[in-house]
Structure formats: C-alpha cells, structure tokens
Image: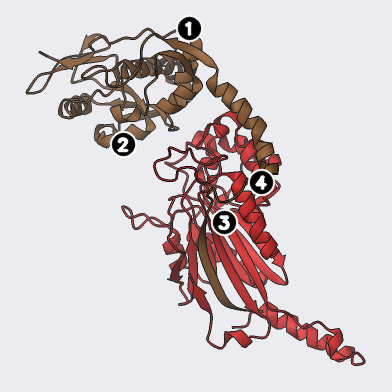
C-alpha cells in the first residue's frame, strides 16, 4: 500500500540521483523508519486540579500539572508527537464559572496542544465567550461540520489542519455534535450544524487528494455510540460509512474504552476509534510506525491494542 | 513511507507522576483567587438547611424553590410579559446540605453542582393533574413554591396555586429546570408543553445572587406540602 505522496517523493529522489551522477550514493541519507505518536484527551471539563480525594470513582486522579509531566516524558521519547483534544474543554469546575476558560486555554497552550475541536460545552459562555478566550489558545480549533460563516468565529475555525512530522504528513479534521437541543440557540447563535458523515467524506477527500496526507485523524465530538438511540450518528457509524480515516478520536459520551476499538470502514479497511472517559483522568496514546522501504510490511499492517 | 504497525493504549494520570512546577505555578494564583471567591461569606443561616428536615417539604427545598421564584419571575415577566404560577423541582436535585452559620458560594456549588437553567413550561390543566398525581405516587419532598397540597391515602387534596384553587380548565406556567423539563426524574408531564420558555438563568447563579442580596436566611417550613392527617 504505497500512498501517492510517498511514490512522488521516491520518484523525485531517483531523478535527483540521476542528475548528480558524480556523487557517491553515500552522500544521500537513506530514508529512515519513523514513528508518530498521537496523544489525546477529551471532555476534560475544566478539571484543572486532580479530582477530589473523595471522588466516588477516580479519587485524586487527573490534573494538568501531572499530565504535563506525562506528556514531557513521551515527547522526550519521541519528538514526533501530536497532542490533540476532542472538545468539552470548558465547564465542570468553578474555574470555568469564575475565569471563563482562560486558564484551560493557557494551560493547554503550555502543555503544547497542537489542535482541538469544539464540544457543545465550549459554547457555554456563548460563541462570544469562546471568541474572547481564543487569544489564550496558542493552538488551533478545527471543525468540518460547523459552519461559522455567519458568526464571530468566521475564518477562525478551519475544517482541518495539517502537520509534517519527520516527513510524514498528518491531516487532522474536526466534527461537532448537533447543537439544537443540547445548547441554547442564544449561545451558539448562527452556527450551522452539517451532516458529520457527509462533511467527513468531503474533508477526507481533500486531505488525501489535495493535501496528500499519509495519516488522517478525525477529532470527533459526536459521541461513541447511543445505546438508547442507535440511529443517532456516532463514531461507530462514522467509521463504517467513510474511508481513508486512520484514527477517530472521540468525545461527548464520556466513554472510557478499555482499549481502542477496531472497526471496518466502507472499503473494508481497519479504522481505529479511541475515547478516554472524562476529566483528564486518562490520556490516549496511539503510535503509528512507518517503514521507509516496506521491508517490515511483509505480513501487512498490524494493530496492537 | 509505509504504515506497518499501530499501537494504542490508555495512560492514567495518577499520583505516581510528579507535578510540573511551571504548570503548578501558573495555576496557583487562580486557585488562590478562586478559593477566596468561593470561601468568602455571602450570607448566614441560623439553622442547618437540609432536604430531610420535613416529611414532604424541607427547609432547603422550600428555600431553593422560593429563591428561584423570587429571582426567576421578574426575568420571565420582563422576557414574556407573563408570570409564573408555581414552581417544581426534584428532591434528588439538592446535592448537599448547607450547615448552620456562614454561607459561601462554595455551598451553592455543592447544593447545585449542575449547570441546569430555569425554564418555564406552560402546562394544560390535564398535565398539572399528572404532575399532582406524580407527587402523590412519589411521596418525596420535591421542592415546590406557590403550590400547596395535601396527600391522603387515596389521592391529593386542597390544591392551591398562587393562593387560588386549582382550575383544571386553565393552563399554568410552571418554573422548573431544563433537566426536569426534558424528562429528568421521569417527570414526563413536562414533555411537549403548550409552550416553553428558556430564561438562560442558571439555578446556581440564582442561588448565589439571592445569598448576596440578603443578610441571613429565614427558614420557612410553612406546610406547603403535607399529609392530610
């Protein structure tokens, strides 16, 4: 399975070799195997400090200052790391009620978050409240299915963002949950919710064909699965009805998956879904290993979860 | 480059991880300010306010329902030119007592940790009958205001709404939370109301605003919801 991008890269390299015939082969560094680490949180809900020691389920767990230590350790092991959040950054402790999300965005910036998507609670101080805190976020927000064009966020939230880490191009796009019924219209104003599966298909096509991404990641706040409403659009449906997404990072349903779910997409290929509960008690880690020459791929792609 | 292996796992953030001091230093002044805000005395209560000091009513339930009427009604009037007829919340929605003495905003966060907001559902007389029947079947101290009734062994009796006898042919504007209106605690009579108005005013904000407004609480166990004998 060679991507078009890697094919073009190799073609370009051999052309260069031919043109510079006088140099020995050793002057060109051979492409090395590489490894991309994706770290992710969801539904942190303003949990700045660890949960209280009398918490019914997770006494004393979570907290930004400890998570910072964990992230630092992982980045030291692999600098090719992306840190992502799947929304509902806001609401849940008085830190949000008193400071409006300022501290959440400042700390996420210090922890080196690369990109996030918006959850329904990120509208809790209105779309204007979100905008007013945006200068504190040194990372971007992405959403492919919220149309903000008639709102103050017009142009500030892009459908996707791409990154290049050690020669691997990674596209990250966002999906948000239907706001009607969850959030008061007074808060989300003229934000338009569009069909997540349709917008995912369009965006993934852009990421694969136009951007030539090697890895496609969806930051989703549409929820993992609704047992009482199985027809409601969710991450499992998204995985099954799209193709070319490698990883769906979920949120909203506060689902703590014991391990990432492997689902078949519409082309029969594996897609990974992960979600890690709430309040920042857990953080997901997904590692993608790439081989430069294909020598390690004789047995096909393996997924170890 | 060819993808050949994917590994995935969940990492727990627990006390084996040491704090990143730079992050802790950023949090510290916010934490200090927050604690000062949350712990500054905004009101006094002469008794322990709980949800269990009456049989079908309670000092804390009555207070909560009265506060929400007192602060919610002017907002509703301003927004719609109508007035609230009565108030109903649920017993389970009172999450903590307020001990005798100083009241702080932290108490309000403990009593009402949820972000529920005040909504007004216009119910037909028929739906109000369902509501009264729910109170009869449930026999819990669900907080009410501007409504009074008694329960006998068979049914409810002596219902008054805003000091007037209950009129089955009338519609009533009932103040509750968005959570209950959407069917929380199986209060299904709130679903599909004749009309629905969302105030955008959070219950907790109303409680804090009230505590800031008055110097001390006057407990009010006025037998609004009792057994007939």
Classify mark 2: helix, strand or loop: helix
- Callout 2: residue from which chain? B
Q: Residues within 10 Å of mark 4 (few under 14, many from 20)?
A: some
Image colour assigned to chain A: red
Residue in the picture at 36% in, 11% down? B47
Classify mark 1: helix, strand or loop: loop
Q: Output the letter for the chain in brown.
A: B
Q: Mark 3 points at which residue?
A: A40
Per the model, the C-alpha gap separating discs 3 and 1 is: 47 Å
Residues flagged by tags 4 and 2 on a common chain: yes
Q: Looking at the rendering, in which quadrant would you find the N terminus of chain B?
A: bottom right
Classify mark 4: helix, strand or loop: loop
Q: Name the residue under label 2.
A: B184
Q: Name the residue under label 1.
A: B215
- Residue A188 percent across, percent down from the top left: 54, 39
**Residue A137 drawn above or below residue A39:** above
Please tell me which residue lies in front, A176 or A253: A253
Per the model, the C-alpha gap separating discs 1 and 2 is: 33 Å
- Callout 4: residue from which chain? B
Per the model, the C-alpha gap separating discs 4 and 1 is: 43 Å
**Residue A68 drawn above or below residue A240:** above
């Amino acid at each position: 399975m060679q991507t078009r991008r890697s094919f073009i890269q190799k073609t370009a390299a051999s052309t260069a070799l031919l043109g510079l015939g006088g140099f020995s082969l050793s002057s060109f560094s051979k492409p090395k195997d590489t490894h991309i680490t994706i770290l992710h949180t969801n539904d942190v809900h303003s949990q700045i400090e660890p949960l209280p020691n009398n918490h019914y389920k997770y006494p004393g767990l979570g907290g930004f200052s400890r998570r910072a230590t964990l992230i630092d350790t992982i980045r030291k092991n692999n600098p090719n790391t992306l840190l992502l959040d799947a929304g509902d950054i806001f609401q849940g402790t008085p830190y949000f009620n008193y400071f409006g999300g300022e501290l959440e965005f400042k700390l996420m910036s210090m922890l080196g978050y690369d990109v996030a998507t918006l959850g329904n609670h990120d509208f809790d101080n209105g779309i204007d409240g979100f905008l007013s805190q945006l200068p504190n976020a040194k990372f971007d927000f992405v959403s492919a299915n919220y149309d903000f064009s008639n709102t103050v966020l017009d142009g500030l939230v892009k459908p996707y963002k791409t990154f290049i880490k050690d020669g691997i191009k990674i596209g990250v796009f966002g999906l948000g949950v239907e706001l009607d019924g969850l959030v008061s219209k007074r808060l989300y104003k003229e934000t338009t919710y569009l069909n997540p599966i349709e917008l995912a298909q369009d965006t993934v096509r852009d990421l694969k064909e136009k951007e030539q991404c090697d890895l496609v990641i969806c930051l989703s706040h549409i929820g993992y699965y609704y047992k009482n409403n199985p027809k409601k659009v969710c991450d499992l449906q998204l995985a099954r009805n799209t193709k070319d997404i490698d990883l769906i990072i979920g949120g909203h349903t506060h689902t703590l998956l014991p391990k990432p779910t492997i689902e078949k997409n519409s082309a029969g290929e594996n897609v990974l879904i992960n979600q890690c509960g709430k309040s920042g008690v857990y953080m997901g880690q997904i590692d993608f290993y790439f081989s430069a020459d294909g020598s390690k791929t004789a047995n096909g792609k393996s997924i170890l979860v | 480059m060819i993808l050949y292996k994917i590994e995935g796992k969940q990492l727990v953030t627990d006390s084996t991880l040491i704090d990143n001091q730079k992050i802790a230093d950023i949090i510290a002044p916010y934490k200090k300010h927050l604690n000062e805000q949350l712990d500054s005395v905004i009101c006094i209560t002469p008794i322990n306010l709980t949800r269990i000091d009456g049989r079908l009513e309670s000092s804390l339930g009555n207070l909560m329902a009265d506060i929400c009427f007192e602060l919610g009604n002017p907002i509703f009037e301003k927004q719609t030119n109508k007035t609230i007829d009565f108030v109903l919340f649920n017993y389970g929605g009172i999450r903590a007592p307020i001990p005798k003495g100083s009241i702080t905003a932290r108490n309000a966060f403990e009593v009402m940790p949820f972000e529920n907001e005040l909504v007004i559902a216009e119910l037909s007389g028929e739906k109000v009958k369902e509501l009264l029947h729910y109170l009869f079947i449930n026999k819990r101290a669900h907080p009410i205001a501007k409504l009074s009734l008694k329960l006998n062994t068979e049914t409810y009796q002596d219902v008054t709404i805003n000091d007037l006898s209950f009129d089955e042919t009338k519609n009533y504007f009932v103040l509750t939370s968005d959570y209950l209106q959407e069917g929380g605690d199986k209060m299904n009579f709130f679903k599909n109301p004749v009309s629905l108005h969302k105030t955008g005013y959070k219950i907790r904000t109303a409680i804090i605003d009230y505590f800031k407004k008055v110097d001390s609480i006057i407990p009010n166990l006025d037998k609004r919801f009792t057994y007939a004998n």
